[in-house]
Image (cartoon, rainbow, N blue to C red):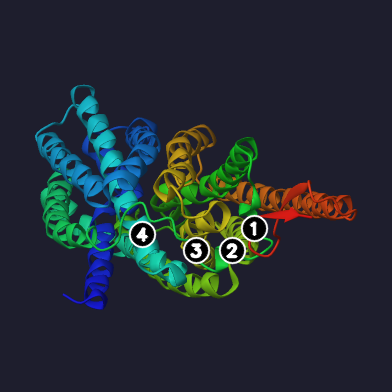
Amino acid sequence: MKMPMRIALVYVSAFTVILFISFGMAGSLTILYVKDWFGLDSITPVALYLTISFTVSTIMMFFAGHLYDKWGPVAPLLLALLSIAVWTLCVNTLARQRVWDSARWLWYTAGALNGLALSSAIMGVNPTLMRINPSKRGLSVSVSQTAMALAMVVWSNIITVLAVRMGIFSALTVAGLVNVAVILMSLTVFRGLAKVIPPDSRGRTAREARPGNLNGESKPGQLMRLLVQVFLMVLSVALSSMALVQFLAGLVEESFARLAMAPEEVRTTIVPTVMTIAGLAQAVSAVLWGYAIDRFGPLRAIPIVYSLETISSVIAYMLVFANPWIAAGFIVARLAFFGAEPVAHWVLIPVVFGSANLGKISGIVNSAPMVAALISPVISGLIRDSIGSYSYILLVSAILSTVALAAYFYLISLQRKREKRALQKASSVRSHIQSPNPYMCAEATCLRNKQPVSLCV
């Protein structure tokens, strides 16, 4: 098989795996059905499933990245396969439960397995996509992000239909069986790719070597501080987005209830429609922003994305009850910009840190959305249960995206100071060696390619 055909199969397989493993994108809808299944008044105990799921994802992202760096994409995908198979068994057992007190621990176990499957699949797919086409990393990662966005379209409609006809847990069992089949078929393609592209490739593209990039750091302490700064920035904006994604169904249902519409009508018609449009908007946004990021770089794209997210959240909050239809449009716009976040953040990693240990560093930075996802259900659920309204989640989202924007500018300001100090140090070295001395050598860093050079006179 020729390499271009193999790469095409990798793109198709990656898209399919992420599309089906991301049925959690309809999680806000699933929570409502599970809450009604057990006859609960509060949503927080059920939403704890999401907290547990993303806690496990957070912990396992680095481990899955280590598996990738050592054995390639097949190892994390095998782990995802095992996890989703056991998850399917758990939800199938829950289909025969009606008492929450006896079923909740099995529900929470399923949440842990879901988190393990999601993190393993992501770490098997995204680093591979960036390596097979290093000059088009934005578009490559947009393949998986588009699939994740379309998952909201696909699963919100499938789960709605299946939950009404056979019950929520039988519907989830079907989703699990489909996932098992898809991952099994995709493993063949990824196993063949591992023989062509070594998982520990350390090549750097021309973009990574340009002056002004953040990967000019050399000391471990400086690299660690840079890693923490990037992590906190991603965490802030991820918290902003996850609050909306996880409670989108409840927010839309509450907003349209002011129009004297029956809750069941809103849940079965308007909510899936909004989720479908939002998913399509995210898919288109991921591709367009992937192209833009490849052309202009993530450092220019990130502040634009964060600013647009803040503006759309504020407008949606102002109109959520005054005009639910227009508010829904701005919520869709906000979720469309969310489609650009993962693409920018994944491509940012090799630009900032280089390609060495891509799996481990990607696992650390991209565990930030997992941390956000495990914190968000509790915080947002408490806001809704204590205030009695989902609308304030929009306001919290706007505040958090503003914090992320401030963190970005702080990161850039620190980097400019580092570059200024590096230039001063290089200038000092050059002035120090003006006097000829055949026994003296100095070492400096070439600002063009970031490589050490010896200055001997």
> Mark on residue 337?
none
In the image, residue 238 lies at what x, y percent? 51, 48
Q: Amino acid at mark 1?
A: Lys
> Mark on residue 450?
1
Q: In whole angstroms, how far apart are the C-alphas of marks 2 and 4?
A: 47 Å
| Among numbered discs 2 and 4, the one appearing first in the sequence | 2
> Mark on residue 340?
3
In the image, residue 438 lies at what x, y percent? 80, 51
| Among numbered discs 1 and 4, the one appearing first in the sequence | 4
Q: Amino acid at mark 2?
A: Ala
Q: Nearer the viewer, mark 2 or mark 4?
A: 2
Q: Amino acid at mark 4?
A: Val
| Among numbered discs 1 and 2, the one appearing first in the sequence | 2
Q: Nearer the viewer, mark 2 or mark 3?
A: 2
**Residue at mark 2:** 209
| Labels 1 & 2 near each other (Cβ < 8 A) | yes
- The front one of 299 and 333 is 299
- The front one of 229 and 176 is 229
**Residue at mark 4:** 271
